[in-house]
Amino acid sequence: MQLEDMILVSVDDHIIEPPGLFEQHIPKKWAERAPKLIFDEKEGVWTWVWEGGTSITAFINAVVTLPADEWGFDPSSHAEIRPGCYDADLRVRDMDRNGVLASMCFPTFPGMAGTFFGNVDDKALAAAVLQAYNDWHIDEWAASHPGRFIPLPLCPLWDPEFAAEEVRRVAKKGCTAITFSEDPVSAGFASFHSGAWDPFFAACADEGVVAAIHIASGAGGLTGHPDTPMDVMVTMPCWNALPTAANFLWSGIFMRFPDLKIALSEGGTSWIPGFLDRMERHYSKQKWTGADLGGRTPTEVFRDHFLACFICDPSGLLLRDRIGIDNIAYEVDYPHSDCTFPGSPEELWEHIELAECSDEEIDKITHGNAMEWLRFDAFSHVPREQASVGALRAQATDVDIRTRSKAEYKKEFEAAQAPG
């Protein structure tokens, strides 16, 4: 296999939501109370505002093709970022240019697990807003290009029973994944150790819907002290996948719901061999805890229930046999600061060659595992021969991938908005 022959499915990208997303989907009763993207003239930034608070998009979450010296946590504006961040048509063009067949996109302003929607006191309003968001995501964003987007609706974290109902509702609309939190308690909601979330997990298992848990969707990683370097704050959240996996492993949830599947989004893979070593030793030595895995080993439980997702993890590819070749999936992380656009295939291929992966292993890692776990048949819409890196890129040679400043994007945006 050559680089151009790979087929890439990214199980973790992000949407910078466009203004007006609620307009066609929220009932009239709630329309005036839905979040709105407004311009704060005092601060000079665009902000999502509603009864539940405010939310901005930091530039670090939308930096593709911006010069590195313009990255940061300062608020971004749609006028100053690459249009593919918020426009589905242009996103697909960027995917073509990057050789990516399909993408599963997490939210931005609502938070990775939709916690922003749970902050409002009126939970009937919260429910209406969340369902409107989900319908926009499914019926507009994902449906705009069949076979190119894997729908990913949000879970209402404030109400496990309603969450179960939403799983069943979106499953009827064709969804095979839904967001969840690393730690609902950190956001003020019920612990999954309490049993309160059993209706949600039951619905996911019954409907074959994967619970996609993104890093920093709950615990948030190491908080540190006031003098903790920014580099520590930015690098640590990826390790949240480890305690998340441990909590689920020993929770008994998989005993109660043997068909439940979890995707550890942006959690990486290189930590897994050492994690499994420790879990195996604990299970064999620490009998006093009374842990019961139903006759399976920790490694067997992990491989039955977890899909591990990575952006750049050469050590994980070298240790793929210890992880489980059927448990690894690829992600691009567009348009975040850690993303590999527009050279995703080149970076991935370098590490695949280093690890000496076979063609069969490459197919599993790049798209096969994602399509199987998420029950996503992209080839029913895009023939396999048109789905490779080389074939997609051949359709997008005109897509501009030059580095451009915020000011340049703003000038182009304003020109496009001008009358005539």
Image (tube, rainbow, N blue to C red):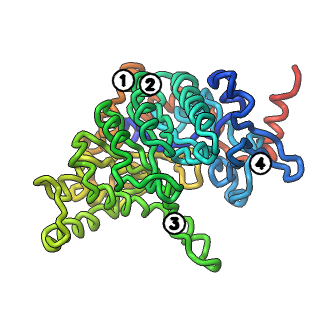
Give the residue at mark 1.
379
**Can see residue 347?**
no
Labels 2 and 3 touching (C-beta < 8 A)? no
Going from N to C along the chain, the mark reached first, 2 or 3, is 2
**Whole-number angstrom distance, CA of label 3 to CA of label 1:** 36 Å
Give the residue at mark 2.
147
Circle 1 Cα neighbour tier, 10 Å, few/some/many (<14 / 14–19 / ≥20): some
Above or below 376: residue 342: below
Give the residue at mark 3.
235
Of 156 and 420, the residue lying toward us:
156
Labels 4 and 1 touching (C-beta < 8 A)? no
Going from N to C along the chain, the mark reached first, 2 or 1, is 2
On the rendered structure, is 305 left or right of 15? left
Labels 2 and 4 touching (C-beta < 8 A)? no
Measuring 66% from the left and 29% from the top, which residue is drawn there?
A: 21
Above or below 111: residue 133: above
On the rendered structure, is 357 left or right of 168? left
Where is residue 193? Give x, y as percent. 34, 56
Give the residue at mark 4.
406
Residue 35 occupies quadrant? top right
Q: Nearer the viewer, mark 4 or mark 3?
A: 3
Residue 282 occupies quadrant? bottom left
Where is residue 360? Give x, y as percent. 24, 41
**Whole-number angstrom distance, CA of label 4 to CA of label 1:** 37 Å
Going from N to C along the chain, the mark reached first, 2 or 4, is 2
Going from N to C along the chain, the mark reached first, 4 or 1, is 1
Q: In the image, what residue type sits under mark 1?
A: Phe
Check disc 3 and report its element: helix, strand or loop: helix
Check disc 2 and report its element: helix, strand or loop: loop
**Whole-number angstrom distance, CA of label 4 to CA of label 3:** 26 Å
